[in-house]
Protein backbone atom coordinates (compact mmCIF):
# COMPACT_ATOMS: atom_id res chain seq x y z
CA UNK A 1 0.00 0.00 0.00
CA UNK A 2 1.32 3.45 -0.96
CA UNK A 3 1.26 6.44 1.36
CA UNK A 4 -2.12 8.10 1.86
CA UNK A 5 -2.69 11.84 1.51
CA UNK A 6 -2.87 12.24 5.30
CA UNK A 7 0.37 10.33 5.82
CA UNK A 8 2.08 12.51 3.22
CA UNK A 9 0.99 15.66 5.04
CA UNK A 10 2.37 14.34 8.34
CA UNK A 11 5.71 13.39 6.76
CA UNK A 12 6.09 16.76 5.04
CA UNK A 13 5.44 18.57 8.31
CA UNK A 14 8.18 16.49 9.96
CA UNK A 15 10.67 16.98 7.13
CA UNK A 16 10.27 20.77 7.13
CA UNK A 17 12.29 21.16 3.94
CA UNK A 18 11.42 24.82 3.29
CA UNK A 19 14.52 26.97 3.49
CA UNK A 20 16.91 24.05 2.98
CA UNK A 21 19.24 23.37 0.06
CA UNK A 22 19.57 20.41 -2.31
CA UNK A 23 23.14 19.23 -1.81
CA UNK A 24 23.16 16.03 -3.86
CA UNK A 25 20.96 13.73 -5.95
CA UNK A 26 21.45 9.95 -6.06
CA UNK A 27 19.39 7.52 -8.14
CA UNK A 28 20.15 3.92 -7.07
CA UNK A 29 17.82 2.19 -9.54
CA UNK A 30 14.98 2.66 -12.00
CA UNK A 31 12.19 3.21 -9.46
CA UNK A 32 13.66 5.38 -6.70
CA UNK A 33 15.76 8.47 -6.09
CA UNK A 34 17.16 10.31 -3.07
CA UNK A 35 17.61 14.04 -2.42
CA UNK A 36 20.29 15.04 0.07
CA UNK A 37 19.10 18.27 1.67
CA UNK A 38 20.63 20.58 4.23
CA UNK A 39 19.46 23.23 6.66
CA UNK A 40 21.86 24.54 9.32
CA UNK A 41 22.39 21.58 11.66
CA UNK A 42 19.74 19.49 9.87
CA UNK A 43 21.10 17.30 7.06
CA UNK A 44 18.37 15.01 5.71
CA UNK A 45 18.22 12.30 3.08
CA UNK A 46 14.79 12.33 1.45
CA UNK A 47 14.08 8.98 -0.19
CA UNK A 48 11.43 8.81 -2.93
CA UNK A 49 10.14 5.49 -4.25
CA UNK A 50 7.85 5.16 -7.27
CA UNK A 51 7.49 1.38 -7.01
CA UNK A 52 3.97 0.25 -7.82
CA UNK A 53 1.99 -0.39 -4.65
CA UNK A 54 4.53 1.25 -2.34
CA UNK A 55 4.98 4.82 -3.58
CA UNK A 56 6.38 6.91 -0.75
CA UNK A 57 8.50 9.83 0.37
CA UNK A 58 10.29 9.80 3.70
CA UNK A 59 13.51 10.56 5.49
CA UNK A 60 15.98 7.71 5.62
CA UNK A 61 19.14 7.09 7.60
CA UNK A 62 20.14 4.20 5.34
CA UNK A 63 23.06 4.59 2.97
CA UNK A 64 21.81 5.02 -0.58
CA UNK A 65 23.81 2.81 -2.92
CA UNK A 66 24.92 4.60 -6.06
CA UNK A 67 24.23 3.00 -9.41
CA UNK A 68 27.29 1.75 -11.25
CA UNK A 69 26.52 4.03 -14.19
CA UNK A 70 24.89 7.46 -13.54
CA UNK A 71 21.28 7.41 -14.70
CA UNK A 72 19.64 10.00 -16.93
CA UNK A 73 17.18 11.66 -14.54
CA UNK A 74 19.74 11.86 -11.75
CA UNK A 75 22.18 13.71 -14.01
CA UNK A 76 19.42 16.06 -15.18
CA UNK A 77 18.46 16.98 -11.62
CA UNK A 78 22.09 17.47 -10.61
CA UNK A 79 22.65 19.84 -13.50
CA UNK A 80 19.54 21.89 -12.69
CA UNK A 81 18.78 21.85 -8.96
CA UNK A 82 21.97 20.84 -7.17
CA UNK A 83 22.69 23.74 -4.84
CA UNK A 84 19.16 25.13 -5.25
CA UNK A 85 17.23 26.57 -2.32
CA UNK A 86 13.87 25.00 -1.42
CA UNK A 87 11.39 27.88 -1.32
CA UNK A 88 8.39 25.74 -0.40
CA UNK A 89 7.30 22.12 -0.08
CA UNK A 90 3.67 21.07 0.10
CA UNK A 91 1.07 18.61 -1.10
CA UNK A 92 -1.39 19.85 -3.70
CA UNK A 93 -4.64 19.59 -1.79
CA UNK A 94 -5.10 15.92 -0.94
CA UNK A 95 -4.00 14.66 -4.36
CA UNK A 96 -0.78 12.86 -3.31
CA UNK A 97 1.22 15.21 -5.54
CA UNK A 98 4.06 17.07 -3.79
CA UNK A 99 5.39 20.33 -5.15
CA UNK A 100 8.86 21.67 -4.33
CA UNK A 101 9.54 25.22 -5.47
CA UNK A 102 13.27 25.73 -6.03
CA UNK A 103 15.50 28.71 -6.69
CA UNK A 104 19.02 28.37 -8.08
CA UNK A 105 21.25 31.40 -7.89
CA UNK A 106 23.10 32.62 -10.99
CA UNK A 107 26.41 30.85 -11.58
CA UNK A 108 29.55 32.17 -9.92
CA UNK A 109 32.90 31.61 -11.59
CA UNK A 110 36.24 31.88 -9.82
CA UNK A 111 39.35 32.28 -11.95
CA UNK A 112 41.89 29.50 -11.23
CA UNK A 113 44.82 30.55 -9.07
CA UNK A 114 47.35 30.04 -11.86
CA UNK A 115 45.40 32.41 -14.13
CA UNK A 116 44.89 34.86 -11.29
CA UNK A 117 48.62 34.98 -10.74
CA UNK A 118 49.34 35.42 -14.44
CA UNK A 119 46.71 38.11 -14.79
CA UNK A 120 47.65 39.66 -11.44
CA UNK A 121 44.09 39.37 -10.25
CA UNK A 122 42.87 38.11 -6.89
CA UNK A 123 39.12 38.53 -7.01
CA UNK A 124 36.17 36.42 -7.99
CA UNK A 125 34.29 37.13 -11.19
CA UNK A 126 30.55 36.86 -10.75
CA UNK A 127 28.46 35.96 -13.74
CA UNK A 128 25.54 38.26 -14.43
CA UNK A 129 23.22 35.32 -15.10
CA UNK A 130 19.73 35.54 -13.58
CA UNK A 131 18.44 33.25 -10.85
CA UNK A 132 16.53 30.22 -12.11
CA UNK A 133 13.27 28.93 -10.69
CA UNK A 134 12.09 25.34 -10.93
CA UNK A 135 9.20 23.22 -9.69
CA UNK A 136 9.75 19.58 -8.81
CA UNK A 137 6.48 17.61 -8.77
CA UNK A 138 6.47 14.20 -7.06
CA UNK A 139 3.37 12.19 -7.94
CA UNK A 140 2.88 9.30 -5.51
CA UNK A 141 0.06 7.47 -7.29
CA UNK A 142 0.33 3.68 -6.89
CA UNK A 143 0.20 2.72 -10.57
CA UNK A 144 1.20 6.04 -12.11
CA UNK A 145 3.97 7.41 -9.92
CA UNK A 146 6.33 9.88 -11.53
CA UNK A 147 8.59 12.87 -10.88
CA UNK A 148 8.63 15.96 -13.09
CA UNK A 149 11.14 18.80 -13.21
CA UNK A 150 9.41 21.86 -14.61
CA UNK A 151 10.28 25.48 -15.23
CA UNK A 152 8.43 28.32 -13.52
CA UNK A 153 5.60 27.98 -16.08
CA UNK A 154 5.18 24.23 -15.39
CA UNK A 155 6.66 23.23 -18.74
CA UNK A 156 8.28 19.80 -18.36
CA UNK A 157 12.08 19.88 -18.59
CA UNK A 158 12.38 16.16 -17.90
CA UNK A 159 10.58 13.36 -16.06
CA UNK A 160 11.60 10.23 -14.17
CA UNK A 161 9.48 8.10 -16.51
CA UNK A 162 8.94 9.38 -20.02
CA UNK A 163 5.40 8.61 -21.16
CA UNK A 164 4.75 10.43 -24.46
CA UNK A 165 1.42 8.66 -24.94
CA UNK A 166 0.12 10.42 -21.82
CA UNK A 167 1.62 13.79 -22.73
CA UNK A 168 4.29 13.44 -20.04
CA UNK A 169 7.32 14.39 -22.09
CA UNK A 170 9.82 17.21 -22.37
CA UNK A 171 8.39 20.42 -23.76
CA UNK A 172 4.79 19.68 -22.75
CA UNK A 173 2.92 21.56 -20.04
CA UNK A 174 2.35 19.42 -17.00
CA UNK A 175 -1.33 18.72 -16.37
CA UNK A 176 -1.92 18.90 -12.62
CA UNK A 177 -4.93 17.59 -10.74
CA UNK A 178 -7.40 20.31 -9.89
CA UNK A 179 -7.04 21.39 -6.27
CA UNK A 180 -10.38 21.14 -4.51
CA UNK A 181 -11.25 23.26 -1.54
CA UNK A 182 -12.56 20.82 1.01
CA UNK A 183 -14.83 21.65 3.87
CA UNK A 184 -14.04 20.60 7.42
CA UNK A 185 -16.57 17.78 7.13
CA UNK A 186 -14.94 16.52 3.95
CA UNK A 187 -11.51 16.67 5.57
CA UNK A 188 -12.79 14.66 8.52
CA UNK A 189 -14.29 12.10 6.15
CA UNK A 190 -10.92 11.79 4.37
CA UNK A 191 -9.17 11.27 7.70
CA UNK A 192 -11.55 8.45 8.54
CA UNK A 193 -11.30 6.92 5.07
CA UNK A 194 -7.50 7.16 4.94
CA UNK A 195 -6.30 6.95 8.54
CA UNK A 196 -2.66 7.51 9.44
CA UNK A 197 -1.10 4.13 10.21
CA UNK A 198 0.78 4.01 13.51
CA UNK A 199 3.27 1.19 12.73
CA UNK A 200 3.30 0.14 16.39
CA UNK A 201 5.28 -3.05 15.76
CA UNK A 202 7.94 -1.14 13.88
CA UNK A 203 8.22 1.43 16.68
CA UNK A 204 8.47 -1.26 19.38
CA UNK A 205 11.12 -3.18 17.47
CA UNK A 206 13.09 0.02 16.81
CA UNK A 207 12.96 1.04 20.49
CA UNK A 208 14.31 -2.38 21.50
CA UNK A 209 17.22 -2.14 19.04
CA UNK A 210 17.99 1.53 19.78
CA UNK A 211 17.51 2.10 23.54
CA UNK A 212 19.35 5.44 23.35
CA UNK A 213 16.94 6.74 20.73
CA UNK A 214 13.64 4.92 21.38
CA UNK A 215 11.23 7.31 19.65
CA UNK A 216 11.63 7.32 15.84
CA UNK A 217 9.81 9.98 13.84
CA UNK A 218 6.84 8.99 11.74
CA UNK A 219 8.97 9.39 8.63
CA UNK A 220 11.53 6.95 10.02
CA UNK A 221 8.79 4.45 10.87
CA UNK A 222 7.58 4.63 7.27
CA UNK A 223 11.08 4.07 5.96
CA UNK A 224 11.61 1.08 8.27
CA UNK A 225 8.25 -0.46 7.39
CA UNK A 226 8.63 -0.22 3.63
CA UNK A 227 12.32 -1.03 3.52
CA UNK A 228 11.83 -4.23 5.53
CA UNK A 229 8.70 -5.43 3.73
CA UNK A 230 9.58 -4.19 0.27
CA UNK A 231 13.14 -5.43 0.60
CA UNK A 232 11.96 -8.93 1.44
CA UNK A 233 9.54 -9.02 -1.51
CA UNK A 234 12.09 -7.45 -3.83
CA UNK A 235 14.82 -9.78 -2.61
CA UNK A 236 12.73 -12.87 -3.33
CA UNK A 237 11.89 -11.60 -6.81
CA UNK A 238 15.52 -10.74 -7.57
CA UNK A 239 16.72 -14.12 -6.33
CA UNK A 240 14.24 -15.79 -8.69
CA UNK A 241 15.70 -13.74 -11.55
CA UNK A 242 19.21 -14.68 -10.43
CA UNK A 243 18.33 -18.38 -10.42
CA UNK A 244 16.89 -18.19 -13.94
CA UNK A 245 19.98 -16.35 -15.15
CA UNK A 246 22.25 -18.92 -13.46
CA UNK A 247 20.39 -21.97 -14.77
CA UNK A 248 20.31 -20.54 -18.30
CA UNK A 249 24.04 -19.78 -18.36
CA UNK A 250 25.01 -23.00 -16.56
CA UNK A 251 23.05 -25.22 -18.96
CA UNK A 252 24.68 -23.59 -22.00
CA UNK A 253 28.17 -23.85 -20.55
CA UNK A 254 27.69 -27.46 -19.46
CA UNK A 255 26.36 -28.37 -22.93
CA UNK A 256 29.39 -26.71 -24.55
CA UNK A 257 31.71 -28.60 -22.20
CA UNK A 258 30.00 -31.91 -23.05
CA UNK A 259 30.47 -31.20 -26.77
CA UNK A 260 34.17 -30.52 -26.21
CA UNK A 261 34.57 -33.77 -24.28
CA UNK A 262 32.78 -35.74 -27.01
CA UNK A 263 35.06 -34.16 -29.59
CA UNK A 264 38.09 -35.07 -27.48
CA UNK A 265 36.99 -38.72 -27.40
CA UNK A 266 36.70 -38.63 -31.19
CA UNK A 267 40.16 -37.07 -31.52
CA UNK A 268 41.62 -39.73 -29.23
CA UNK A 269 40.69 -42.26 -31.90
CA UNK A 270 42.65 -40.29 -34.52
CA UNK A 271 44.98 -43.28 -35.00
CA UNK A 272 42.29 -45.01 -37.05
CA UNK A 273 42.71 -42.41 -39.82
CA UNK A 274 46.44 -43.16 -40.08
CA UNK A 275 45.69 -46.87 -40.16
CA UNK A 276 43.07 -46.38 -42.91
CA UNK A 277 45.59 -44.34 -44.90
CA UNK A 278 48.06 -47.20 -44.60
CA UNK A 279 45.41 -49.65 -45.82
CA UNK A 280 44.61 -47.45 -48.83
CA UNK A 281 48.28 -47.45 -49.83
CA UNK A 282 48.51 -51.23 -49.32
CA UNK A 283 45.39 -52.04 -51.36
CA UNK A 284 45.36 -49.02 -53.65
CA UNK A 285 45.72 -51.19 -56.72
CA UNK A 286 42.02 -52.18 -56.19
CA UNK A 287 40.73 -48.62 -56.79
CA UNK A 288 38.84 -48.82 -60.10
CA UNK A 289 37.85 -45.15 -60.47
CA UNK A 290 34.11 -45.77 -60.06
CA UNK A 291 33.45 -47.06 -56.53
CA UNK A 292 33.38 -44.65 -53.56
CA UNK A 293 34.52 -47.40 -51.17
CA UNK A 294 37.61 -49.54 -51.03
CA UNK A 295 36.84 -53.10 -49.91
CA UNK A 296 39.88 -54.72 -48.30
CA UNK A 297 41.08 -56.96 -45.48
CA UNK A 298 42.38 -55.25 -42.35
CA UNK A 299 45.70 -56.95 -41.79
CA UNK A 300 45.55 -56.09 -38.05
CA UNK A 301 42.21 -57.80 -37.38
CA UNK A 302 41.81 -60.07 -40.40
CA UNK A 303 38.29 -58.67 -41.01
CA UNK A 304 36.87 -57.26 -44.22
CA UNK A 305 36.27 -53.47 -44.03
CA UNK A 306 35.05 -50.65 -46.30
CA UNK A 307 37.00 -47.38 -46.47
CA UNK A 308 35.37 -44.32 -48.02
CA UNK A 309 37.49 -42.82 -50.79
CA UNK A 310 37.26 -40.34 -53.66
CA UNK A 311 37.23 -42.49 -56.84
CA UNK A 312 38.64 -39.58 -58.88
CA UNK A 313 41.79 -39.47 -56.75
CA UNK A 314 44.75 -41.82 -56.74
CA UNK A 315 45.59 -44.11 -53.83
CA UNK A 316 48.33 -41.71 -52.70
CA UNK A 317 45.96 -38.72 -52.76
CA UNK A 318 43.24 -40.57 -50.79
CA UNK A 319 45.80 -41.77 -48.26
CA UNK A 320 47.15 -38.19 -47.97
CA UNK A 321 43.62 -36.98 -47.03
CA UNK A 322 43.43 -39.52 -44.19
CA UNK A 323 46.93 -38.65 -43.00
CA UNK A 324 45.99 -34.94 -42.95
CA UNK A 325 42.88 -35.68 -40.86
CA UNK A 326 45.04 -37.73 -38.49
CA UNK A 327 47.54 -34.88 -38.20
CA UNK A 328 44.85 -32.25 -37.50
CA UNK A 329 43.08 -34.31 -34.85
CA UNK A 330 46.34 -35.22 -33.13
CA UNK A 331 47.44 -31.57 -32.92
CA UNK A 332 43.90 -30.45 -32.06
CA UNK A 333 43.77 -32.76 -29.06
CA UNK A 334 46.11 -30.46 -27.11
CA UNK A 335 43.96 -27.43 -27.96
CA UNK A 336 40.86 -29.32 -26.85
CA UNK A 337 42.43 -30.09 -23.49
CA UNK A 338 43.06 -26.37 -23.03
CA UNK A 339 39.50 -25.48 -24.14
CA UNK A 340 38.01 -28.04 -21.74
CA UNK A 341 40.10 -26.67 -18.87
CA UNK A 342 38.96 -23.12 -19.72
CA UNK A 343 35.30 -24.25 -19.91
CA UNK A 344 35.53 -25.98 -16.52
CA UNK A 345 37.12 -22.86 -15.05
CA UNK A 346 34.31 -20.68 -16.49
CA UNK A 347 31.67 -22.96 -14.91
CA UNK A 348 33.47 -22.78 -11.55
CA UNK A 349 33.56 -18.95 -11.80
CA UNK A 350 29.83 -18.92 -12.65
CA UNK A 351 29.08 -21.09 -9.58
CA UNK A 352 31.13 -18.73 -7.38
CA UNK A 353 29.40 -15.67 -8.85
CA UNK A 354 25.96 -17.17 -8.21
CA UNK A 355 26.92 -18.08 -4.63
CA UNK A 356 27.96 -14.46 -4.09
CA UNK A 357 24.66 -13.21 -5.54
CA UNK A 358 22.61 -15.52 -3.31
CA UNK A 359 24.55 -14.32 -0.25
CA UNK A 360 23.76 -10.64 -1.02
CA UNK A 361 20.95 -9.38 1.23
CA UNK A 362 20.75 -5.79 0.00
CA UNK A 363 18.13 -5.75 -2.82
CA UNK A 364 19.52 -2.56 -4.36
CA UNK A 365 23.03 -3.99 -4.61
CA UNK A 366 21.59 -7.29 -5.84
CA UNK A 367 19.65 -5.49 -8.57
CA UNK A 368 22.81 -3.70 -9.67
CA UNK A 369 24.78 -6.96 -9.80
CA UNK A 370 22.04 -8.63 -11.86
CA UNK A 371 21.87 -5.69 -14.24
CA UNK A 372 25.62 -5.99 -14.75
CA UNK A 373 25.46 -9.73 -15.45
CA UNK A 374 22.61 -9.26 -17.93
CA UNK A 375 24.39 -6.53 -19.89
CA UNK A 376 24.62 -7.38 -23.63
CA UNK A 377 28.10 -8.37 -24.81
CA UNK A 378 28.19 -5.38 -27.16
CA UNK A 379 27.96 -3.06 -24.13
CA UNK A 380 30.58 -4.81 -22.04
CA UNK A 381 33.83 -2.93 -21.65
CA UNK A 382 36.64 -4.92 -23.26
CA UNK A 383 39.82 -5.59 -21.33
CA UNK A 384 41.87 -4.46 -24.33
CA UNK A 385 41.37 -3.33 -27.94
CA UNK A 386 41.52 -5.70 -30.89
CA UNK A 387 40.84 -9.42 -31.11
CA UNK A 388 42.27 -12.26 -29.03
CA UNK A 389 42.68 -15.99 -29.55
CA UNK A 390 43.98 -18.87 -27.46
CA UNK A 391 46.30 -21.31 -29.26
CA UNK A 392 48.16 -24.08 -27.46
CA UNK A 393 47.60 -22.26 -24.17
CA UNK A 394 48.98 -18.97 -25.53
CA UNK A 395 46.89 -15.81 -25.76
CA UNK A 396 47.28 -14.06 -29.10
CA UNK A 397 46.14 -10.40 -29.20
CA UNK A 398 45.72 -8.81 -32.62
CA UNK A 399 45.16 -5.12 -33.29
CA UNK A 400 42.88 -4.44 -36.24
CA UNK A 401 44.54 -1.17 -37.23
CA UNK A 402 47.54 1.00 -36.40
CA UNK A 403 45.68 2.81 -33.61
CA UNK A 404 44.73 -0.43 -31.81
CA UNK A 405 48.25 -1.81 -32.21
CA UNK A 406 49.69 1.36 -30.72
CA UNK A 407 47.20 1.17 -27.81
CA UNK A 408 48.13 -2.50 -27.21
CA UNK A 409 51.84 -1.70 -27.10
CA UNK A 410 51.38 1.26 -24.77
CA UNK A 411 48.80 -0.02 -22.30
CA UNK A 412 48.24 -3.78 -22.55
CA UNK A 413 51.38 -5.83 -23.23
CA UNK A 414 54.75 -5.82 -21.52
Image (spheres, grey):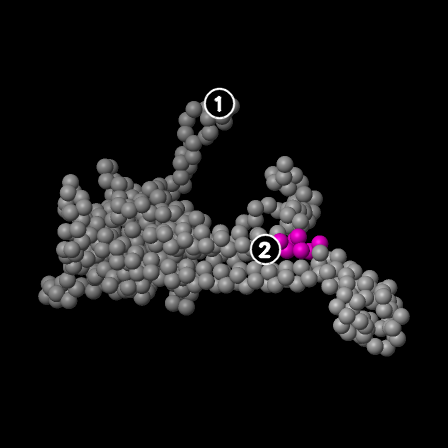
Residue 206 in picture, x, y percent from top left: 18, 49
Q: Residue at x 43, y 63 (%)?
A: 244
Q: Which residue is mark 1?
A: 117
Q: Secondary structure at mark 2?
A: helix
Q: Residue furthest bottom?
A: 290
For label 2, the residue is 340
Name which of mark 1 and mark 2 comes first in the sequence: 1
Callout 2 crowding tier (Cα within 10 Å): few <14, some 14–19, many ≥20? some
Determine the residue located farthest toward the front in the rendered image. Answer: 302
Q: Residue, x 50% and y 63% (percent of image)?
A: 251
Label 1 to label 2: alpha-carbon separation: 65 Å
Q: In percent of the image, x 61 and y 63: which residue is there?
A: 262
Out of 30 and 339, give the one closest to the viewer.
339
Q: Quadrant of the N terminus?
A: bottom left
**Residue 334: in magenta span:** yes
Residue 319 appears left or right of 201: right
Residue 166 highlighted magenta (yes or no): no
The foreground one among 3 and 117 is 3
Q: Which residues are magenta?
A: 331-337
What's the mark number on residue 140? none
Q: Residue at x 46, y 30 (%)?
A: 111
Amino acid sequence: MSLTCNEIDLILSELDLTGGFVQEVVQPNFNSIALYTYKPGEPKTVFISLESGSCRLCETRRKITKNEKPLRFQEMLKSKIKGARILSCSQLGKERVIKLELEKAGAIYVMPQAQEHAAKKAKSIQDEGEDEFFSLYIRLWSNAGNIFLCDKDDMILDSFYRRPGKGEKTGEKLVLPEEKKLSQAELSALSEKFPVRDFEEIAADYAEKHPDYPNPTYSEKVDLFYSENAAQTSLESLLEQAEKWYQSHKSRQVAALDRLKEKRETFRNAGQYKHQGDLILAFGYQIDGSSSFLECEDYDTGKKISIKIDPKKSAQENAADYYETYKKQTSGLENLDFDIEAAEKAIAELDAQYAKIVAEKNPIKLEQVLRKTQKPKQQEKKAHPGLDFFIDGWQIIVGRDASENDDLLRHTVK
